[in-house]
Image (cartoon, rainbow, N blue to C red):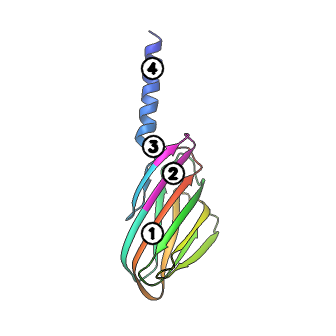
């Protein structure tokens, strides 16, 4: 009889972990996520912006019980016309900026601390006028508990 309650608790705990496993929200981006080793949340997001006329801040929310953990983000930003500056900023104010031009995508890997809302933040800014055909793709691994 004692094994039944333990089994029920184990099943419920697994169901709770599965229900929240890898939840990643990217605003207007299409995102998916997963949990690895119960200590990492990973995900990928992508978005296409037809015309970028002004600075747009992108927020990728990571579901985790920790506050402001660190994540490693691999990214690629492509543009069909114009120039786009991509700036990743973490909660400590550290910035990393690269530019994308037609035929020369911006890409790299950054380590950022998520903000207090557990978001990865970056800006896309057109340089010297609007940019069109702006696409980004990023993958990240957050060193955090789901």
Front label number (3 vs 2): 2
Q: Secondary structure at mark 2?
A: strand
Disc ID at residue 7: 4
| 101 lies above or below 45 | below
Dot 4 surroundings within 10 Å: few (below 14), some, or many (20 or more)? few
Disc ID at residue 136: 1
**Left or right, 134 with reference to 90:** left
Magenta stretch in the rendered image: 34-45
Q: Name the residue beneath numbered marker 3.
A: 21
Residue extending furthest toward the bottom: 128
Q: Secondary structure at mark 3?
A: loop
Front label number (4 vs 1): 1
Front label number (2 vs 4): 2
In the rendered image, residue 61, in percent from the top left (x then y), is placed at 47, 57
- Which corner quadrant of the image does residue 98 belong to? bottom right
Measured in 3D between alpha carbons, the distance from the residue under mark 4 to the one under mark 3, in whole angstroms, is 21 Å
Dot 3 surroundings within 10 Å: few (below 14), some, or many (20 or more)? many
Front label number (3 vs 1): 1
**Which residue is located at x 43 percent, y 82 percent?**
54
Q: Quadrant of the N terminus?
A: top left
In the rendered image, residue 122, in percent from the top left (x then y), is placed at 52, 69
Q: Earlier in the sequence, mark 2 or mark 1?
A: 2
Residue extending furthest toward the top: 1
Label 1 near label 4: C-beta < 8 Å? no
């Amino acid at each position: 009889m004692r094994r039944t309650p333990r089994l029920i608790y184990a099943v419920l705990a697994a169901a709770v972990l599965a229900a929240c496993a890898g939840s990643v929200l990217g605003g207007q981006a299409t995102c998916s996520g997963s949990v690895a080793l119960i200590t990492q949340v990973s995900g990928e997001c992508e978005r296409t912006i037809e015309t970028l006329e002004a600075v747009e801040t992108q927020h990728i929310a990571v579901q985790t019980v920790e506050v402001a953990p660190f994540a490693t983000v691999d990214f690629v930003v492509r543009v069909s016309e114009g120039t786009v500056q991509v700036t990743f900023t973490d909660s400590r104010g550290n910035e990393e900026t690269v530019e994308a031009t037609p035929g020369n995508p911006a890409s790299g890997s950054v380590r950022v601390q998520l903000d207090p809302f557990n978001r990865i933040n970056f800006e896309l800014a057109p340089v010297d006028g609007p940019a069109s055909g702006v696409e980004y793709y990023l993958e990240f691994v957050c060193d955090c508990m789901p």
